Image: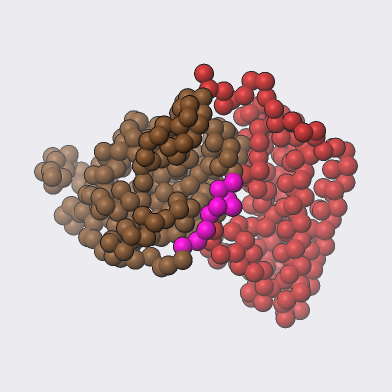
Amino acid sequence: MSAGKSPVGADIVDLAELLAHAYAIEVEAAERYRVLGDQMEVHNNPELAGLFRELAGHEEKHAAEIKARALKTGMAELKPSEFKWPGTEGPELAALDDAHYQMTPWHALQMALAAETRAFEFFNSIVESTAELDIRKWAGEFREEEAEHVALVEGLLEKYPEPEAGWSEDDDPPNMQE
Amino acid sequence: MNISNPAKASDFKSDLKPVWCPGCGDYHVLLSMTKALAELECRPEEVAVISGIGCSSRIPAYLNCYGFHGVHGRSLPLGTGLKVARPDMTVIVAGGDGDGFSIGGNHFLHACRRNIDLTYIVMDNRVYGMTKGQPSPTTEPDWDSALSPGGTGLSPFHPLVIALASGANFVARAFSGDIKGTSNMIVEAVRHPGFSFVEILSPCVTFRPEQREWKSAIHPPTVEPTDDPARAARRIMTDDGFNVGILYRGTRRPYRIGDGVASREVGDLDTAFAI
C-alpha cells in the first residue's frame, strides 16, 4: 500500500486549501455513494440503491454549503496527488470493497458510520495540530458538522438491527458453476 | 458534457453504470484511472483506452475518452496501431489476465519487444470471471473449484517476469484497493517512454472470494526500482506475488516512426512498421 500520511493540520497551509479538502470530502463521498447506489440497482437491491442515493444527497447538500462558504475565502484548485489525506483516499469515502450484492441497510449504515467517523477524525487532527487560528476555527466547525453526521447515522442504525448470520446466502448465486 | 479545464477525475467518468459485481476490484481501478488522467492533465479527447474481452475489458465504456472494446486478446495490436498512427495521443490498453496472457499472450510478448510508447494495464484476478470461474493463466495450480477439481496442477504464468524478459521498458505491480498508489503507478507508467506494463491485482469477490484478503497480504517493495534487467529479474523471481511498486524502469528508446507526427496514410504505416 502507498504510505498513509499522518493527518497533520500543519500541512494545511491556508483556508483556501482547507476548503478544498472539506469540499472534496463531500463531493467524493457523494460520488462514492452514487456508485454504490448504481451497483445495488444493477444487482436488483432497490432498497439499498435508494439508501445509498439518499446518503449521496446529504453529501451533495453539504458540498453545496461548503462551496457557498468558500465564496468568501476562495478555494484552492488541487490535483488528486496534492490532497493531504491521512490514507490512500479521502476520509469520508465508503469502502468499495465492503460492498456485497445482498448487503442490508445495516451494512450500508455501518459503512457510512465508519466514513463519517474518519471525516470527524480528519478535521479533529487539524484542529489539534494547526497553529493557524482561522484554520483551527473553520476545521472545528467542520468537525462539529461531522459529529452531527455521526450522530445522524447512529440514529438511523437504531431502525435496522444487525442481520442474522447467513444474510449473504443465495439460493441462486451468480457464481454457480455449471 | 462540460469538461473542466484542467479536467478533473470526475470528467473522465462516463454516464454508463458499471455492471461489475459489488466489491469487485475493477471499480477501484476505474477510479485510479480517472485520477491518474486528471493528474496527467490530459484532456479526454487526447486519451484512448483500448480493451479486449472480459469483465475488466468493459472499462473503456465507463471512461469518458476515446475507447475501443475490441476482439478477445487483440487489444495490444489495436493499441499499437493507434499509437503508431496517432503518436500524439495517450494510449492505454487495459484488460484481464485471461485476455492478456492466454488469448492475447503472443501479442503481449511482442508488444513488450516492440516497445511502443503505450501503457498496458492488466487487472489480474487469476480467474475467468465473465464465463463463470474457469482457471486463467495466473491461477494457482492448487485452486480447487467445480471447474478445476483438485486444481489444474499447471505452473502459473508470471506476467512481470515475462514482461521483463520480453523487453518491456517499465514493469510494475499495484493493488486495486490502494487507489492512490495505483493512480500514482499509472501516472508513472504513462510518463515513462516506451512500453509500460502494470499488473494490478484486482480481486474477483464472486469467484475468488478469498481474494478479499489480498488487502492484508499486500506489502510495499523493500528496494528502489532498478534500470538493470538482471537485477530486476532476480528480485521478481524471489517475489511472493504481493510486492507492489515499480520493479523496473528501463532506458530503451521507444519504437518511433519518423518525427513522431501523426500519419494519415496507411501506406506510410505499412512501410514504416514492417519488422
Residue A53 occupies which quadrant of the picture? Answer: top right
Residue B191 visible at all:
no
Q: Is residue B220 above or below residue B119?
A: below
Residue A68 occupies which quadrant of the picture? Answer: bottom right
Chain B: its colour in the image is brown
- x, y (%) of residue A56? 71, 44
Q: Along the horizontal axis of the image, is A157 left or right of A108?
A: right
Q: How is the image coloured?
A: by chain
Chain A: its colour in the image is red
- x, y (%) of residue B177? 56, 50
**Residue at position x 46%, y 62% in the image:** B221
Stretch in magenta: B213-221
Of residues A75 and A113, the one nearer the viewer is A113
- Residue furthest top as drawn: A178
- x, y (%) of residue A17? 64, 69
**Residue at position x 46%, y 66% in the image:** B222
- Residue furthest bottom as drawn: A131
- Residue furthest left as drawn: B271
Residue A167 in magenta? no
**Residue at position x 55%, y 42% in the image:** B211
Q: Is residue A96 above or below residue A164?
A: below
Q: Along the horizontal axis of the image, is A91 left or right of B163?
A: right
**Residue at position x 41%, y 44% in the image:** B122
Q: Quadrant of the N terminus of chain A?
A: bottom right
Residue B234 occupies which quadrant of the picture? Answer: bottom left
Residue A47 visible at all:
yes
Q: Along the horizontal axis of the image, is A127 left or right of B129?
A: right
Of residues B193 and B246, the one nearer the viewer is B246
**Count of numbered marks:** 0
